[in-house]
Amino acid sequence: MTWVTDDNVALLTDLYELTMAASYHAHGMNDQATFDLFVRQLPQQRKFLISCGIEQALDYLDHLHFNNDAISYLRSLGMFEEGFLRYLAGLEFTGEVRAVPEGEAVFDGEPILSVTAPLIEAQIVETFLLNCIMFETMIASKAARVNIAARGRRFVDFSLRRDQGADAGLRAARASFIGGAAASSNVLAGKVFGIPVNGTMAHSYVMAFEDEVKAFRCFLRDFPKDAVLLIDTFDVEEGARSAAQVANELASEGVTLSGVRIDSGDLATLTFSVRKILDESGLGQVQIVLSGDLDEYRIEALIEEGVPVDAFGVGTQMGTSGDAPSLGGAYKLVEDVHGPKIKLSTGKATLPGRKQVYRVSGGRGYAHDVIALEDEASPGGLPLLQQVMAGGRRCGEREQLAAVQRRCSNTLASLPEGLRSLDSSAEVYPVRHSPKLEGLIRRMQSEAG
Amino acid sequence: MTWVTDDNVALLTDLYELTMAASYHAHGMNDQATFDLFVRQLPQQRKFLISCGIEQALDYLDHLHFNNDAISYLRSLGMFEEGFLRYLAGLEFTGEVRAVPEGEAVFDGEPILSVTAPLIEAQIVETFLLNCIMFETMIASKAARVNIAARGRRFVDFSLRRDQGADAGLRAARASFIGGAAASSNVLAGKVFGIPVNGTMAHSYVMAFEDEVKAFRCFLRDFPKDAVLLIDTFDVEEGARSAAQVANELASEGVTLSGVRIDSGDLATLTFSVRKILDESGLGQVQIVLSGDLDEYRIEALIEEGVPVDAFGVGTQMGTSGDAPSLGGAYKLVEDVHGPKIKLSTGKATLPGRKQVYRVSGGRGYAHDVIALEDEASPGGLPLLQQVMAGGRRCGEREQLAAVQRRCSNTLASLPEGLRSLDSSAEVYPVRHSPKLEGLIRRMQSEAG
């Protein structure tokens, strides 16, 4: 079947990127321009986002090319001049990219990534950059919220079957790991990214045997160290007793039951009962894993009830960010050879000029951010945008995923307490404009009329 | 960068599929088994779903193989016996698949796809089948709702930048075309699926020129037949006047303005003003395209207000199905060599046995469906599940996408009127169980406890 790969991804773009490019080409408009990628307004249910997807964006820019197949298809549309098609056939990305490192918190209006390149190059990469960065940022942000809600308990990405297609499956595992997941059920993500893989068993496994005890006995013998038994195929408490019986029966063979999983029913009540059954069977070390439509809200509620849970599997909500299933990402022209640019559409205004974002700490964590023009003196704080590509080539080494996960963990620990609350009515992180940026905006607004 | 392709997609699975398979292999459990894929309960905001993603599922089953790289990675996990890895290295899918044709409406609990194969083969394909069929079904269903709301007006898939990754972008274009979209902005989808591609221009294009009039003049000359000008970069009415001025100025050059697009602001009010400006400039044939966070609800409201709109671009909501961003798809063992199987978990019961779904019409459209056992006499109506794969090979030809789109259009026209309403409180389509299926469920429930 047809998959998106390095060979065809150049065409994974909105047609208008190419018609605009053709027009720029026809008019010799290909001077350097700067575009910022940012989220204008965070969804109501989000008080921070976690930068993610930058790696994939750089890989894309690094390999961008239109092959013969692509050019032939574009020719068949009958819309493009041969001169433009020839130009496209030789096109490579030669620009500069600055980005907020993956795993770092970002807020409303702050550039997550900024591209400076000849206008045509900068324009045609828009669609893919939005697609990849917004999706991964959405998932990493969701995972970070689950991370906060789980208060140190392990959680595992179970989203693959709910993810939106194959590529989303692979990227969701990566993004949720960055947000704090301990592992993923996704085997390919394990292979590609080195993420620990994790799994239990399905109800169909239990149903494929004559009874639950036989199923548990087989599985425990086959996986004598890491088995997690699913105990809700028929009756959860009965399932817990069967698991305990089999674990004790096979202990003499050197088999250790690692955990049990409950995937349905009243999880709070059942977990208390199951903990009791396990403890009374001398299996105090056996962990209880919960799953079944969990998200950060349900996890927080379970923990607040004191439910004796050890780990969570988070599927659908991890993969779809159900309470905020899209981010309104924008990729806007902010400067060209004629100077800063501003857009004034109702509710869709942009911040003009090449910018830097400074994060100012105070007390025990982050205090506020300042969006400033790139060429003004630092208002204090740490600059977030780092140069990651120059002349179309990556700067520096690829980061280890574990290092990115640690960065995210540090950034979460530095957020003001109110931002770590799931309550959507609580405080908003202060993002200020530097006086010079504010002055530029006012001047351009008044010039525009 | 690493993409999912035919070569590695076998690993795009939950680890537990492989641990269960290893256990089945160790115990010689590999007799024929039947699994049904279905949505247990439709989201509250959906009264029907449109079957989609079957083609991709069949392609996957057709090509399924674990290559040397995959086997080496699995070996490195230290969980699997060599005998099982050898078995996996030689594995192909050899089973039978029945499915509801793409484009056809399906309802709660009805199998969309049913797999009969040796147990291990049937089990390990679960994760991918859910991932691909549920996503595409969700998008086709969303598009079908937009289709109904648009009441014959064109709508175009603008979702690519909001889709969840690259593969989702490609599949969302296909699924939304099946649901009734006239075109997609996604160029690769045009190439791969032959979907018409469509596009206008971005705000950045207008901003790259000295002023709007110059931008419009260039673009119209460059695309003298199909240009749609984006008129909301600065002020919409001013933009409409500029578009009209340029269209009339260039008419003598044989240039025809096709349309204008409004992407922000109060769309209803602005569309009335813009229509007036265009008409007064003798441009009655110039179409108005609306976009900007549209979905079926907003489209219905605009049309009910009598807004003179000709076409819609639907992006974020098409690609994420924001009001119902996931489907609770299940893939369950329903029969094996020992007979029908049932699962009794709270709220997650399954319908036992190999089944067929019959659609009974009456009056002017569909009246109700009956889920029956496969071997019972037809209760009347048309059987929905068709055999699409036998012995691991596809049956019949690939369908043309246009034919699938027509099937969807016919199925939508046959839905009871209440089901075509966006009001989530309205009628529910009747899905009945045949007496023989109901008898089997009761017998198995009473045997279980």
Image (tube, coloured by chain):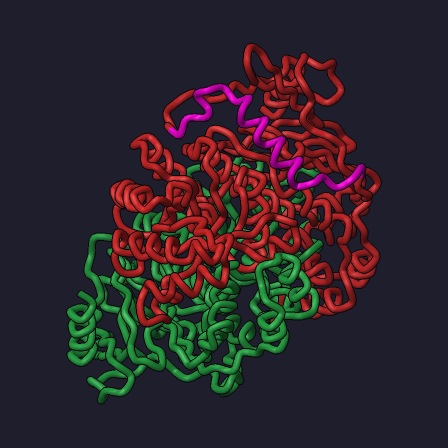
Chain colours: A red, B green
Whole-percent x, y for residue A324 in the image: 43, 41
- List x then y, in percent, for residue B325: 41, 51
Vertical order, A120 against B71 (above or below)? above
- Does the segment drawn in magenta span residue A403? yes
In which quadrant is the C terminus of chain A drawn? top right
Q: Is residue B86 left or right of residue A202?
A: right
Q: Nearer the viewer, residue B210 or A233?
A: A233
Q: Confirm whether residue A328 shows in the render.
A: yes
Figure quadrant of residue B409: bottom left
Figure label count: 0
Is residue A417 rendered magenta in the image?
Answer: yes
Q: Is residue B432 visible?
A: no
Q: Look at the image and give the residue range highlighted in magenta.
A: A395-422
- Relative side of B237 to B446, left or right: right
Which residue is at a point 47% across and 71% down the rendered structure image? B24
The percent coordinates of residue B74 (x first, y second) are 62, 62
Question: As drawn, is A328 to the left or to the right of A18?
Answer: left
Magenta span: chief secondary structure: helix
- The image quarter containing residue B343 is bottom left
Residue A108 coordinates in the image, percent (x, y):
53, 29
Q: Can you name the residue that lies furthest to the front here?
A: A252
Of residues B13 and A89, which is closer to you in this image? B13
